[in-house]
Amino acid sequence: MFVYLLLLTVIDVTRQVHICEDALNEFEEKLRNTNAELPVMEATLQNISARLKAFDYLHTSGLYSALHLRQLSQELEEIHQSVNETHKQNPNKETHDLLNELNKAKNDVQRMYRDDFFNLESMKKSSPSITKLNSISKSYISGAWGRDALLSSKERYWEHCLVSGHKHGNTIRMYNSLEDFMANNNYKDEEIAPSYSHENAVQGSGTILYNNTVFYQCYSTTEICSFSITTHATKRVHLAGAGIDNKFPFCYYSCRDWTDIDLEADQDAVWVIYATEENHGNIVVSRLDPVELNITHTWKTHLFKRSVTSTFMVCGVLYATRFVNTYQEEVFYAFDTTTGQEINTLSLPFEKVSPGIANLNYNPVDGRLYLYNDAYLLAYDTFF
């Protein structure tokens, strides 16, 4: 009996030894795999870090190269998942340090996404997501349309068509939903001025709606008007030196008259784009206080206004487009009001349905670009 019990004990001990040996072999295999993977992971991280440093240098130097931040971000995410899994299986100082480096690199990429407004390699524009004729007449080839640009505003769409030689207007059509706009239903025509020749009437197609207030060039003057749809009150501010009456319109191969002054809005402010003799016909950008209606800052660019078909603002950056052909435009220029940097080597084409552009504006609420294109109203979804 004793011998039998002793034999059972030996068998059990032997089984435990085999289990321990198997576990040890498995651990050694994982360790070998980890040691083999770590140099590859470290090399990949060093490569990504070097590319990030190169991009950071170009960015801070005001130089540009398409280094594809999106691709770097994807590579970082893949290696982060691999290192994190390895660290869970076998925690050690090497994997811990790698994870810290990876987190730092991911934060650097996110910072560059936020700061690099000029990197339009990461911005994509679709074909028009909305295309329709204006609701009044195909003969009204000049005007503007869009959505209230205040971030906290209700869903409110607007349409403004110029009459009297495609120069003046005195009403703006309002819709409370995109469905109503598309169906031309349930709209309300707000009277900005008693007639299109009144001193408070609209001149040109550079109109924008911000916080239920219409901002536009006042009739035949170098003044900016704001008209509150809520109170029907009108304010005015003088725009010193601005060219008007087709002195400095947007004009390239296919032109629209009376585009001397363009109002734009982004998530930060209302902006005025125009040109002056003092700046040799080049574009000037002024920032407006939308409540007090006074000019707070002004920047001068080196971009000749008559070489441009349209402009829009995103995050304090001015973008300009030019004519490519009957059915295509191109974003080719950007000016950052924060740094004063400008670049004219961008190439971002987008489709249109007719040659002439009357108005192009960006809306920060839905991220769309709104285009008035020879009586057609188009909208583009943008992705940054």
Image: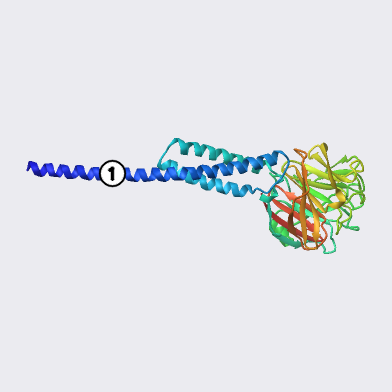
Relative image position of residue 162 (x, y in whole percent): 86, 56
Q: Nearer the viewer, residue 363 or 328?
A: 328
Name the residue at 73% across, 53% down.
Answer: 369
Residue 327 shown left or right of residue 40 in the figure: right
Residue 294 place in picture, x, y as percent? 83, 37
Q: Nearer the viewer, residue 128 or 14?
A: 14
In this rendered view, identify the residue nearer to me: 368 or 29: 29
Q: Quadrant of the N terminus?
A: top left
Query: Is residue 35 something that shows in the picture?
Result: yes
Q: Is residue 229 visible?
A: no
Splitting the image into 4 quarters, where does residue 28 fall?
top left
Q: Residue 242 versus residue 37: which sits nearer the camera?
A: 37
- Mark 1 is on which residue type? Glu
237 to the left or right of 327 = right
What element does badge 1 sit on? Answer: helix
* Vertical placement of residue 147 versus 28, above or below: below
**Residue 150: image location, x then y, percent:** 72, 45
Asked whether, in this view, residue 339 is left or right of residue 165, the answer is: left
Whole-percent x, y for residue 196 in the image: 90, 53
Q: How is the image coloured?
A: rainbow
Q: How many marks?
A: 1
Residue beneath label 1, please?
Answer: 21
Q: Residue at x 52, y 37 (%)?
A: 100
Q: Residue placed farthest to the left in the image?
A: 1
Q: Residue shown at 34%/46% (left/top)?
A: 26
* Label 1 neighbour load within 10 Å: few <14, some 14-19, many 20+: few
Up the image or down, 290 lies above or below 363; here it is above
